[in-house]
Image (cartoon, rainbow, N blue to C red):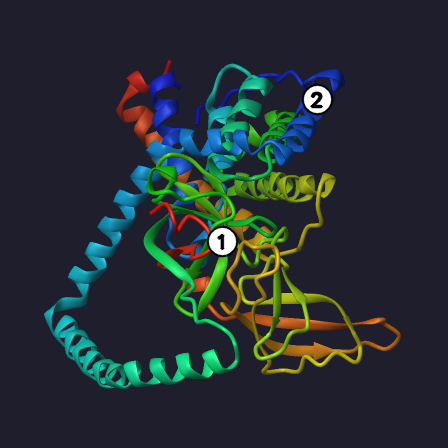
Amino acid sequence: MPGMSLSRPLPSLLRLVLLGAVSAALSFYSVGHPNLQQFGLSLARPILWLNGQVRDVWLAGNQYLQGQAALQSENTDLRQRLHALEMQNLALPVLRAENRQLLALLDSFPTAPGRVTVAQIEAQSLLAGSQQITINAGSAEGVYVGQPALAPGGVIGQVVTVSRDNARISLLSDLSSSIPAQPLGGDEPILVDGQGNLRALSVPFQSRDTKLVPGTELVTSGLGGRFPPGLPLGVVEGVERKNGGPFAQITVRPSANLAALNTILLLWPQTRHSSDR
Amino acid sequence: MKAGALFVGFLLAFLLESLPFGPLYAQLHPDFVALLILYWALSSEQALSYVLIWLIGLLQDLLLGDLLGAQAISLVLMLVLLYTWMNRVRRLPPWEQLFFIFFLLLAQQLAAWLWPLLLRPIAWHNALLIGPALGAALWPLLTYLLDLMQRHWPQLRR
């Protein structure tokens, strides 16, 4: 850089206060008006498209660098796993029939969680508080705000903003995320909150004598109507009771690995949007 | 710098900000937009408009889905701090500038992190320190490459 010595004008306090006030007003306004975020997502389309191209080149490069031997080994491994799964599949119709009979005895009816579609991540913003990813599916594919998003393992979050070609998903770990849940096999209603950490969620307001213990599996309860009941959310990892505190501090490890997301599954629960598809 | 060069520069910076290369990259990468603004301010013969920088920050908020206004006001504060020490920073070679750059990036990052307190709780993450440190470490290389580009293609300058 050329060595210049210019005196720079500092902004007047009034100008700074004005910019601060407009920023604060926008912050408050944007929370109650998702249209602004939707506009931003539409605006970001060219950058998201470029991101998708870079991701594809990156993945293709990785595959190329893996070499033929590694690919053959992976192929053999995948074939073996396919055979094992085919063997397991043979038993599925029998198990399904047995399950249907048992559920009928319990006066209940089995319902599949719904239709799913696959999407790829095009951008991510994993700041300390706001943890969101952007995917390459939008309202053109029928994606809607509040739609459950899954990955291998379980729930990862829900759609918060939708444009024509993209949607933004707020992860379970986002500070604003709170999902109604219950222990697997139990009916005690709880909430699973994000705390800005991809590997640890929390269960707030549980009394010191809570029945939750390390190892307890948590699933969606279906309360609120956004998530169908029974989807895996996480596993209780730690229950801490601090002296004098009224509540136990409960840490939950997400069932899906939020730190290694590649493919996202969007779920259309049976109860909604299924009749018109 | 010419408007076209700046447009391409900011497009690249926005791209680098949001690349889906996993959580490690997402949490640790330096703020490329802030780095480009610092370079632009230090190499420009005219003072940058605070409103223009605020608008660039607002665009970044919109593109990344952050709380609207957080990045915008934090970039303005970073620029105010830079202009406070402008003459001193400019006289330093890039490798000495990096300490100032670290401080400025850290101030910007902390301001953007604290801003959502207006509306919701926030959580500390060590990445808040690592991003600015990596940005400062990149500074000498970045200034070298951008200076080289400006020397090689003088038409990039105004």
Whether callout 1 and callout 2 share a subunit is answered: no
Residue B141 makes an appearance in the image: no
Q: Position of residue B99 (x, y in %)?
A: 58, 44
Examine the rendered structure and indicate whether residue A224 appears above or below residue B106. Answer: below
Q: Position of residue A150 (x, y in %)?
A: 43, 60
Mark 1 nearby-residue class (10 Å; few <14, some 14–19, many ≥20): many
User: From mark 1 to mark 2, how far is it between C-alphas?
Assistant: 29 Å
Q: Position of residue B38 (x, y in %)?
A: 51, 31
Residue at label 1?
Answer: B28
Examine the rendered structure and indicate whether residue A221 appears above or below residue B109. Answer: below
Q: Quadrant of residue A46?
A: top left
Q: Is residue A249 left or right of residue A138?
A: right
Residue at label 2?
Answer: A16
State the residue at coordinates (44%, 45%): B138
Q: Position of residue A135 (x, y in %)?
A: 38, 47
State the quadrant of the C terminus of chain B. Answer: top left
Examine the rendered structure and indicate whether residue A204 appears above or below residue A126. Answer: below
Amino acid carrying label 1: it is: Leu
User: Which chain letter matches label 1?
Assistant: B
